[in-house]
Amino acid sequence: MGCGSSTNAYYLLRKSEKAFKAAVLIQRWYRRYVARLEMRRRCTWRIFQSIEYSCEQDQIKLHNFFSYLMDHFTPSSSNERDFISRILTEEESYKDTELEKLCDYESVEVPDSYMGPHLSFPLRPDHATALVEAFKQKQQLHARYVLKLLHETRRHLMQLPNINHVSTCYSEEVTVCGDLHGRLDDLFLIFYKNGLPSPEKSYVFNGDFVDRGKQSIEILIILFAFLLVYPKEVHLNRGNHEDHMVNLRYGFTKEVMQKYKVHGKKILKMLQNVFCWLPLGTLIDQKVLILHGGVSDMTDLELLGQIERHKFVSVLRGKKREEKCRHVDSAAMNSESPEGVDSPKCSSFPGSCLHPSASRTELSQWVRQTVQEELEKCRRQVGFGETPADKELTCVSSVTMSESELESCGTSHSRQEEWKQIVDILWSDPVPQEGCTMNTVRGGGCYFGPDVTEKILQKHGLQLLIRSHECKQEGYEFCHNRKVLTIFSASNYYEVGSNRGAYVKLGPDLIPHFVQYQANKTAHTLTMRQRISRVEESAFRALREKLFAHKSDLICAFKGYDQDDTGIITLSDWATAVESVLRLGLPWRMLRPQLVRSAAGGMLEYKSWLEHLAVEQRSKEHIQSSLLETIYRNRSNLETIFRIIDSDHSGLISFEEFRQTWKLFSSHMNIELTDDGSSDLVRSIDFNKDGNIDFNEFLEAFRLIERSHGDDKAAELPPTLHSRDSS
């Protein structure tokens, strides 16, 4: 018995040892597995964010391209002057009487066949609830009601301060939501989980309601309706996407015109004037500050509270032509600063530094140099004559003045300071490093460190800054010693499964309580590996498109490492060259296995690799490679340009508008186009001969100009189009 018991004990011990070792091996394998997935997730996340911020940079540069042309192009006739003013000059906020006359919602009839929701004013709670239910059923609110709702919303917003003050004394808690970006399902889910706005349920929506998603107008209608029903419980902050110039690029303008084909233009005009009246921030119990982007070392809540916010219809443009001062301060021109006024620092859009302390000669030289550099950047921005040497990542100045302008006018320092305050709170991002520097990744605002946060909080007696503006995987994230909280409410922002949405609830103790969610049902059924693989696939697809869009520049960069023209470079040189062209700040060596499938001996045949990229894109688009590359690189910019020129948002531009636009561009693009040549060109690209130019025809026109910069294709140019360099 004793011997048998000892044997059994021995075998049990051996068995338990094996089980323990197996458990350790499994645990070790699982940790490595999870670590690899996490590394893939982080790389994927970086790809998406780098591409997103690169697009935001392009938007700011493109707007400054137009601003630059406006400031330096001299119209030769009143028609040209009116045309330029109409497409480029930022519009003032309308007066009540002018806006009522412009929109005239009372003249819009609701037909008997209309089956959607009806509104009567003043709105009641059941009206707002009915809108929610109607949009769940995919119904659309009639344009008359939309216009009336926007009119009443604007009237209400005009009564509000720049910074709303909210108290938890009047409700048990305040719910703060971040970016929604047109994701209506996320808003529905928030209301389902947290309840509809009511006297007992206060909400703060922290900007970026529109763009990117497909149901931005529905989100606005719901939020504006609840704002009017519960003006003390619903608070809306302005985001950087509540800007009509940004909407031209990121989809909201297009969405409105598609859904409201007849009255879309009126609705957009109303929205433009509603957006500029949105408050800039919210303060809870004098302790929690809510801003869309963040702060800078220059942020001043007292100054923010005094700004006439409605004058900044589009924050992208820091000044207006009509607001330039008539005379330059002689003290500034003679190296003297007025008493009590410091020389202005760099603006929140990088690259825009003027030096009022410089002498007249120095200032003139600086302006000449800046204008030339500006012109080169503007040419490259819309894809004309790009070379790898031109690809330095610089942000276009938002304040450029010719020498003659400097002699006759100047920019109001106080106006610029107000603009800077708004730009910083809408566009800035927190970083771990100390200090405050220009946000060169987005192209606007600044990076602010924990010391800047601490300074602002102490100065105003605050304990927490809540901001949005950045997608976070879990829907929220603390930084700066838990003094800054980022809240993002659009789930699946980049791709299904890419991120959760979240909102935060604050009670009288001001302790944050988070609720996370996934609005997409598919995301719930995916395993972690499936979710990461799906998002990763989408990210690399977007990255390959980006690489293909810069195919010509990549070839030039690769040849710089291939002096003997062998067609082969090292993988290390490949990574360096790709970053020098795309400037996305990505770990290309780590991403290489997903982008380069075959590389024998650490060497890459780059021509075949690029051809493989071209085959992938052509198989999807069925367009010739040269044109497709141009479209991929410039399509977003060109579509924005097209929509600016298409002032009535009809999807078409007239021959006259096209001719005026080309005259504007040709003076800066080294392209000589006579009046007869302009007429011939516009007729030649009107392929369907309907007397108008649609977007596809507009793209073709840009391709013709792109071809004019290639020496090997000069023979292909139409006879009416000549390069000044060759004349």
Image (tube, rainbow, N blue to C red):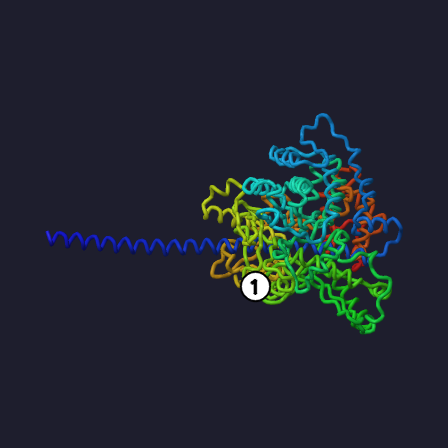
Q: Say if 366 sits above or below 542 in the image.
A: below
Relative placement, left or right, of 126 versus 265 is left
Q: Quadrant of residue 656?
A: top right
Q: Quadrant of residue 308?
A: bottom right
Q: Nearer the viewer, residue 41 or 626?
A: 41
Disc 1: CA contacts within 10 A as few (<14), some (14-19) or many (>=20): few
Q: Residue at x 72, y 67 (%)?
A: 345
Q: At which x and y percent is residue 560?
A: 61, 64
Q: Residue at x 76, y 61 (%)?
A: 416
Q: Say if 642 sits above or below 58 in the image.
A: above
Q: Residue furthest right?
A: 77
Q: Amino acid at mark 1?
A: Pro
Q: Nearer the viewer, residue 474 or 494?
A: 474
Residue under label 1: 432
Relative placement, left or right, of 566 versus 58 is left
Q: Residue furthest top?
A: 112
Q: At which x and y percent is residue 93?
A: 79, 49
Can residue 98 be seen? Answer: yes
Can residue 608 be seen? Answer: no
Please tell me whether mark 1 sits on a helix, a strand or a loop: loop
Q: At which x and y percent is residue 23?
A: 32, 53
Q: Nearer the viewer, residue 669 or 298?
A: 298
Q: Residue furthest front?
A: 169
The quarter of the image holding the C terminus is: bottom right
Q: Say if 105 sits above or below 674 in the image.
A: above
Q: Residue furthest left?
A: 1
Relative placement, left or right, of 181 versus 369 is left
Q: At which x and y percent is residue 545?
A: 60, 50
